Image (tube, helix red, strand yellow):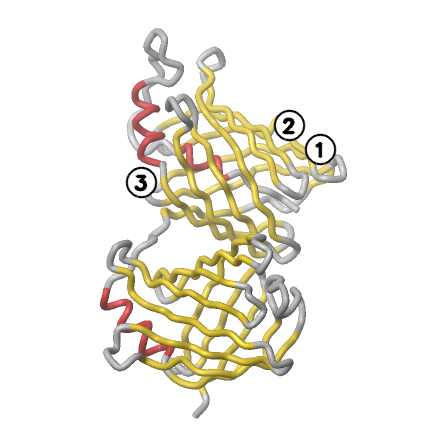
Amino acid sequence: MLRIALLVALALFSSYSVSAQQGDPIPDQLRKQFESLVGKWHMTGTVAEGQARATMTMRWAPGKHAILFNSNWSDPDSRSLGSGVFGWDGSERKVHMSEFWDDGYYHHRHFDIKSDTLWEGEQFAGATPDGEQIRGTIRMEFHGPDEWTFNATSWTHGGQEQEKPKLTFKRAKNTATKEEFAEFLQAMNGQWTGEITILQDIPGVANKGDQLKVSGEHVLTDDGNAITSSFRDEQGATSSSLTFFDPSTRQIREQTVFSSGTAIISYYVKNGDKWQVFSVTTDSEGNRASGTDELTISNNGNTHTWKRGGQANVWHRNQ
């Protein structure tokens, strides 16, 4: 599976200067640009396996000599977690980047800065878990401070041509307004039924790939400031949730607990006409996993479609 480095977050959104000061490994202008990219990002696009999604969190290393990042990737074949580091190589006058994934993939890349809107570079080392060498050339174009595109002009695994990735990165919006929360409450309220495929393991409840019929309801609290939810699947497992607007973080947050003891903490972000749902699942033994879903509301609010990694589950409001 292709792992496209979220290195594109090295984007230069203003004029580039490479005149490094003595004793400072990062030029002043590049340091400012790195600073502007610290935060969270979302990626969507196509790779050989089909549609892919990722989230990335970037932060300064202690001492601000490099940028560290963590990534959460999903495509139709798999999901994986990655970590990496990138910074400035003053001797080569290039940006270098390395990343490693929990399924065994790794990538090493470097880039020349052609202008403040264009980077061109190559993957000079990298491999699949089976040892196939990954090589490629890359063109990245930057469209302001909140979006860029990643297009490989060549891409090979083990010397064989592969589908060239085409990816779009956007700065994450991680907050919500009270107006969006009111819209969310109206969309969720009611009784629901779904015949679903489990998209990730829920210990003590179901395994990834299981197909279950689930029904339940979302009910507005008396003051209209939250929703309580209760659902049951055909095997008797249950879940209970509380969804509310958190004024301290300005997020729509949800806390769910299953009859098995598994707990999920999620938050919802409006993205155009869709909702992004970011979740962390912790089982009764303390093991954690994270994931990202896309929720589309259609049919006058009576149909909810949840997508993750190329799979979709559809829920219908009971009329």
Q: CA distance from mark 1 to mark 2?
A: 7 Å
Choose top left, top right, bottom left or bottom right for residue 295. Answer: bottom left
- Decide: is 100 above or below 32: below
Q: Nearer the viewer, residue 206 or 101?
A: 206
Q: Is residue 74 left or right of residue 25?
A: right
Q: Residue at x 32, y 19 (%)?
A: 17
Q: Which residue is mark 2?
A: 125
The number of discs equals 3
Circle 2 Cα neighbour tier, 10 Å, few/some/many (<14 / 14–19 / ≥20): some
**x%, y% of residue 121?**
52, 28
Q: Earlier in the sequence, mark 3 or mark 1?
A: 1
Image spot of residue 193 (x, y percent): 51, 84
At label 2, the amino acid type is Ala
Query: Residue at label 3?
Result: 145
Which residue lies at the image location 56% right of the left edge and 54% below the top edge? 286
The correct choice, above or below, for 188 with respect to 203 in the image is below
Residue located beneath label 1 in the image:
133
* Mark 1 vs 2: CB contact within 8 A: yes
Does 133 appear above or below 198?
Answer: above
Mark 3 in CB contact with mark 1 (< 8 angstroms): no
Residue 151 or residue 246, whichever sits in front: 246
The image's mark for residue 166 is: none
Cα separation, mark 3 vs mark 1, equals 33 Å
